[in-house]
Amino acid sequence: MDIWIIRDGEKVGPIHDFEVRRKIETGELPATTPAWHEGLDGWQPLIEIGIFTREFELAATTREQAPVVPENPPLPDSPTAPPLPLKTFYLRRFWARWLDLTLYSGIWWISMWAARQDIEAALLNPWVMFLQYVPWFALEPLLLHYFGTTPGKWLLDLEVRNHDGSRLDLAAAIRRSLRVMFTGVGFGWPFLALFCQALSVFTAKRLGTTLWDQSGGHRVTAGPLSPVRIVAMVALYMGALLLQIIVISPYTFELNAKAFPSIKQQFSENPFWHLPERSKPNPG
């Protein structure tokens, strides 16, 4: 849960409730600190908010003295509650992320084909498949540092910023991309990516933001999403996916046919268009 407090006459927040509990335990926040969270009608002293009452009781027991709470604790003059935390746009961010990865993957495979690389060997090499997205996560920090967005995020009108509105410096952008690569998409491996995405949703609901943005102190802002952008996103995503299919389909069918001969017969009877195989150029 996100909490807002007032310290030295200024609104501070949002702060996750576990961080508020830690500050109560260390004595950084007195019981009279005005606080607010979504659902309250107005500011209340921290000790009167149910989820923190026990924390003060435990802190008082530890210090062997109860907190002094005046009968009428001072509250802000303005009864207006602070603004709600920014929206998270998780669904839009999900599609922006996978549009970036799918677009990169399509370009990667067509480049392999154009360079006459052994695509079948690449498909069979677990290290190549495991590390194929690493170049993207080396490029992404540069895009975030200089532009604050990526192709997928730009198309869905998303920007990554620091909490003060400034763009990420290069070191912060690199750290963010590394966290996403390891904990967000699991290097793009299907089953590992599925697990990481589920874990990301769980932690985001607990923290109020994604783990990589919580750790780095970043936020993702979004503009209005028009139908034109949605149609363009779907078209680009399907185009990038098709680009991969027309390159690797003959190799994947050939590999599967070795284990399932019936697949080869079906493919021979009902072939669909794909790029022709390109043999490696002869040296000299």
Image: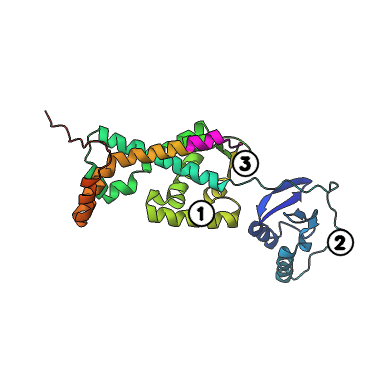
At mark 2, the secondary structure is loop
Q: Nearer the viewer, mark 3 or mark 2?
A: 3
Q: Which mark is residue 70?
A: 2
At mark 1, the secondary structure is helix
Does residue 97 sit above or below 259 in this rendering?
above
For the residues labelled 1 and 3, the Cα–Cα distance comes to 20 Å
- Which numbered disc, 1 or 3, marks the residue that appears first in the sequence? 3
User: Can residue 10 be seen here?
Assistant: yes
Image quadrant occupied by the N terminus: bottom right
Q: Which residue is mark 3?
A: 163
- Whether label 1 touches label 3, CB < 8 Å: no
Q: Position of residue 75 (x, y in %)?
A: 84, 52
Query: Disc 2 residue type?
Result: Pro
- Which numbered disc, 1 or 2, marks the residue that appears first in the sequence? 2
Q: Position of residue 62 (x, y in %)?
A: 70, 70
Q: Nearer the viewer, mark 1 or mark 2?
A: 1
Image quadrant occupied by the C terminus: top left
261 or 30, nearer to the observer:
261
Q: Position of residue 19 (x, y in %)?
A: 64, 57
Tell which residue pokes out farthest to the left in this image.
Answer: 284
Q: Which residue is mark 1?
A: 200
- Whether label 1 touches label 2, CB < 8 Å: no
Q: Is residue 130 magenta?
A: no
